Image (cartoon, helix red, strand yellow):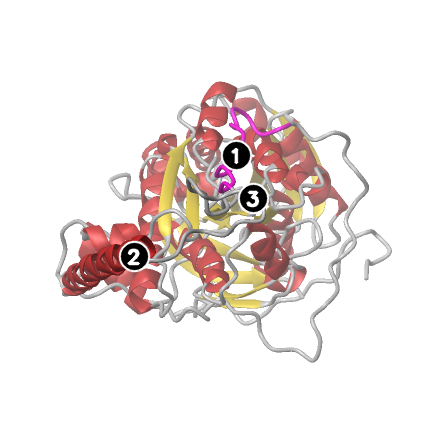
């Protein structure tokens, strides 16, 4: 149900990050004290039904989707599926005496042929038995051994005919991209250890490089394997835009753990899903944070004139939580914010909402504090980048970052990740792990086809590491599944991301 102003009804829920002290302004939270790394342990082994939908009286009907979006482009570089040649029909018995109305010869010749046949079958049976015993021994050694490459038996079990997952990442994201693929590998490994099915799940990884159309097409082409029943990724909005139609036309369900561009929901992609709030959800959360928690309702919006940031500014202006006093556009890679800062006092702004890059946010924070403005600066996940801390320094006081990413809520996952990689999981690791768990949980229910996985994704909600999730008809999270986390950006530029969790904003 929509309110008269077009917004959806919203409310706070229980924050997943308990506040150890009152929510204060102007005092950055201290980073947690370093501790010894936990002892190595086996990765968490979720049960195959970890992502199973909760029971209900009757499965919901598939939601109505928007109208057709026109012709779908065929998947890039997709080679035709090669089907095995049909077996030749059995031929009738033939011989020198065979012919119309005559049967195969009888007598000693046939008896001798029968004896030879039995001998051949016996020899083959011996070979098959020995091979099966050796294969089983190799499989046991491979599954119980500590570390090392998988045994030949495991590779065969996870070969053609067994379901596979794809991962489409972006090395340009640096540590965030690396943490995402690490988390997916952990989920697949844990599933293969815990599953009772005979097939092990393969993971096929690819990368979109610098994000050019040719690189994205080449990345998607790696998924031209009928055994792949689901994909984790892409990680970036631009990659979703370039790869989405190709994945959709291949009937390949994909779940992005980090792309929040709201336009993807308007493309009528049947197989698109995301475990991440949209940029508009983040804007709603920023308005709620400023108006209800920080009591700084008079907001100055600063950002670029691109479509995404203009949509966020329009969403903020439509909110009843705050009053937007002005929207100030800036150029790309702006470093001088003097003209912006000089407008704050005449306009009576009490806070600033910024939608630009990490470097720009750092320069803006420094300019605001130098001019004596002490009100809150609120931005997106760019404020979690080390580049923001490097630019802002101590001027980063009283700034808040909003992000759909969350701290992993499973201690076993954090311990296993840290033990294996010698550093804690980054901001996209938990979402990537949950996206993989979601698809693996469906496979664990013996759903082995793309169509079956796609159909199962409609029948949520699903309980994952980060909470309870369900999808709308456009592949977005339903309103009850959205949590936008509020962080205090760290001021130590040597840190990986400076994520100091404060609370979360949930919508009903």
Counting from the top left corner in percent of width and height, residue 316 is at 69, 44
Q: How many labels does the image show?
A: 3
Counting from the top left corner in percent of width and height, residue 376 is at 52, 47
Q: Quadrant of residue 201?
A: bottom left
Residue behind mark 1: 81
Report the side of 383 relative to 263 (left or right). Answer: left
Q: Which of 271 and 226 is in front in this view?
A: 226
Is residue 81 within the magenta segment? yes
Counting from the top left corner in percent of width and height, residue 427 is at 39, 49
| Label placed on residue 108 | 2
Q: Is mark 1 on a helix, strand or loop?
A: loop
Q: State whether residue 25 appears in this view.
A: no
Q: How crowded is mark 2: few (under 14 residues within 10 Å), some or many (20 or more)?
A: few
Secondary structure predominantly adopted by residues drawn in magenta: loop
- N-term-proximal mark, 2 vs 1: 1
| Distance Cα–Cα, label 2 vs label 3 | 60 Å
| Distance Cα–Cα, label 3 vs label 1 | 15 Å
- N-term-proximal mark, 3 vs 1: 1
Q: Is mark 3 on a helix, strand or loop?
A: loop
Q: Nearer the viewer, residue 307 or 107?
A: 107
Q: State whether residue 147 appears in this view.
A: yes
The residues colored magenta run 74-88
Q: In which quarter of the image is residue 262?
A: top right
Is residue 424 within the magenta segment? no
């Amino acid at each position: 149900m929509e309110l008269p102003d077009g917004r959806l009804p919203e409310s706070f829920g229980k924050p997943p990050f308990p506040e150890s002290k009152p929510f204060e302004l102007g005092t950055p939270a201290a980073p947690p004290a370093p501790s010894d790394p936990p002892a190595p342990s086996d990765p968490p082994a979720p049960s195959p039904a970890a992502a199973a939908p909760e029971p209900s009286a009757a499965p919901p009907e598939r939601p109505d989707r928007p109208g057709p979006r026109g012709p779908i482009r065929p998947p890039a570089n997709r080679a035709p599926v090669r089907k095995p040649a049909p077996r030749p029909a059995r031929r009738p018995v033939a011989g020198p005496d065979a012919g119309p109305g005559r049967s195969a010869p009888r007598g000693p010749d046939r008896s001798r042929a029968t004896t030879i046949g039995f001998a051949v079958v016996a020899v083959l049976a011996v070979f098959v038995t020995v091979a099966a015993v050796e294969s089983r021994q190799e499989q046991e050694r491979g599954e119980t051994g500590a570390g090392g490459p998988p045994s030949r038996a495991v590779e065969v079990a996870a070969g053609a005919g067994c379901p596979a997952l794809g991962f489409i990442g972006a090395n340009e994201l640096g540590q965030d991209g690396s943490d995402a693929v690490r988390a997916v590998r952990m989920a697949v490994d844990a599933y293969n250890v815990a599953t009772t099915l005979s097939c092990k799940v393969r993971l096929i990884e690819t990368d979109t490089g610098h994000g050019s159309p040719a690189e994205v097409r080449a990345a998607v082409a790696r998924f031209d394997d009928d055994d792949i029943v689901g994909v984790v990724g892409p990680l970036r909005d631009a990659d979703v835009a370039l790869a989405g139609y190709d994945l959709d036309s291949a009937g390949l369900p994909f779940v992005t753990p980090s792309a929040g561009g709201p336009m993807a929901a308007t493309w009528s992609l049947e197989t698109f899903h995301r475990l991440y709030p949209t940029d508009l959800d983040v804007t709603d959360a920023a308005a709620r944070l400023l108006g209800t928690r920080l009591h700084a309702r008079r907001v100055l919006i600063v950002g670029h004139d691109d479509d995404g940031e203009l949509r966020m500014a329009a969403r903020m202006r439509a909110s009843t939580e705050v009053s937007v006093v002005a929207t100030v556009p800036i150029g790309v890679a702006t470093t001088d914010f003097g003209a912006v800062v000089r407008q704050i006092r005449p306009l009576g702004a009490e806070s600033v909402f910024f939608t630009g890059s990490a470097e720009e946010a750092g320069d803006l924070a420094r300019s605001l504090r130098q001019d004596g403005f002490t009100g809150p600066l609120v931005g997106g996940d760019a404020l979690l980048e080390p580049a923001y801390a490097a630019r802002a320094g101590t001027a980063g006081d009283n700034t808040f970052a909003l992000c759909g990413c969350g701290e992993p809520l499973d201690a076993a996952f954090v311990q296993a990740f840290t033990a294996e990689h010698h550093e804690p999981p980054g901001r996209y690791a938990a979402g990537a792990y949950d996206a993989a768990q979601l698809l693996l949980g469906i496979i664990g229910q013996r759903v082995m086809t793309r169509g079956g996985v796609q159909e199962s994704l409609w029948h949520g909600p699903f309980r994952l590491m980060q909470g309870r999730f369900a999808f709308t008809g456009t592949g977005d999270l339903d309103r009850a599944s959205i949590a936008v986390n509020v962080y205090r950006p760290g001021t130590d530029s040597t840190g990986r991301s400076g994520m100091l969790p404060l609370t979360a904003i949930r919508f009903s």
